[in-house]
Each structure stands twice: as C-alpha cells, then as structure tokens.
Image (spheres, rainbow, N blue to C red):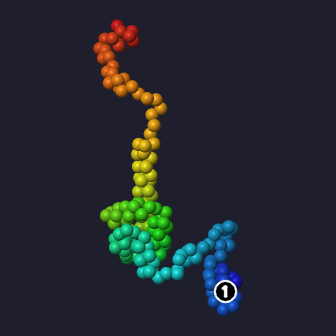
Amino acid sequence: MQVTEDNRLLIYDGDTGEILAEHPLSLHRKGELIRNNNHGRDRTKGIQAYMDHVAERFTDSHGARRYLEEIRRQKPRYIRDQLQAIERSVSEATTESADQALAYCLKRSLYRAADFADAVKYYMDTAQRQIVEKPNESNIQLLAQVDPAKLKIKPQIRGYETYKRILGGR
C-alpha cells in the first residue's frame, strides 16, 4: 500500500506491482466509508451476455430483452448496476410477479431498476393478499350447527312510533 501526496491510497499486488485498487483518503471525516462501486459489480460477464442471462429469467425473454436494451440506451453508464438490481428483484419474486412487473414497466415506459423492483413488490404483495383473502373452503368449519329453519325467520318490523315511545319521545 502507498499513500500519495494528493491523499490517495494505492493498493498494489505484492508479486506483480499491479495497482489493484485506488481510493481517496478521508482525512477530515473519521469513520467515513469510501467504497469503489466496481467492487460490488459482477464483472465476470460482458454486458450483452449479462443482459441475455437476466432476460432468460422471464417467461417473455423477447420482451425482457427489449426492456433491458432500452435501459441500456437510456442509462449506459449504469447498465451493470441496473441489471444487478433487476436480477436481484427477479430472484426474490415468483415468475408470475416478475412477468407482471415487466409487462407493467413496458406498458408505462418505466425504464429503471427501481421502478421494476417497486412493480415486483406490488405484484408480490397483491398475490399474497389474494391468498389471505380467499380462504380454502375445505378449511372452514362451523363452530356450531345452524338450524336451517332459523335462517328463514324474518324479524318483526315495527313502526317508527313504537321506537319513539320506547325511547321516551312520546
């Protein structure tokens, strides 16, 4: 490691002397984390191969490719980060929710991974609510048997004057 005159930390490979990382030093703010975003990126695949890999996670891989190509066109500098975020959302979702989110984003021209993630969350939550709201009829058991004749009884209908008299309004 070496600290330069302009307060940058250089980290070298001890065997080859190749610079492995370079970071600015934070001398005035103790405890500040300085991180190079490239360290968290998957650099094992080229962008096109990575796009193909993510697109194959969808039922409509052709639509997914169109979607990812548009993100690449609009945000070329951040495409790898966008792909990682979309892949993470898809891996945490059901196939149906991911496909619904893709269709929603394509229809509304929402070309950001954050928008896609929000749509996935919405469709996942909606699916979960439907499961909770539609109980399986075979699991429902009555606590007491109800006499069918009682269900046919009609309550007596009283006039307004009766209630007025009961409440003391005379």
Residue ranking furthest to the top? 170
Tell me residue 120's x, y (percent): 43, 60
Tell me residue 18's x, y (percent): 63, 89
Q: In which quarter of the image is residue 33?
A: bottom right
Vertically, is 141 above or below 34?
above
Task: Tell me which residue sits at (62%, 82%) in the image.
Answer: 21
Helix, strand or loop status at disc 1: strand
Quick one: 131 or 5, which is closer to the camera? 131
User: Which amino acid, mark 1?
Assistant: Tyr
Quick one: 31 or 71, which is closer to the camera? 71
Q: Name the residue under label 1.
A: 12
Task: Tell me which residue sits at (36%, 27%) in the image.
Answer: 148
Task: Tell me which residue sits at (42%, 81%) in the image.
Answer: 48
Tell me residue 152's x, y (percent): 32, 24
Q: Can residue 78 be seen in this view?
A: no
Q: Quadrant of the N terminus?
A: bottom right
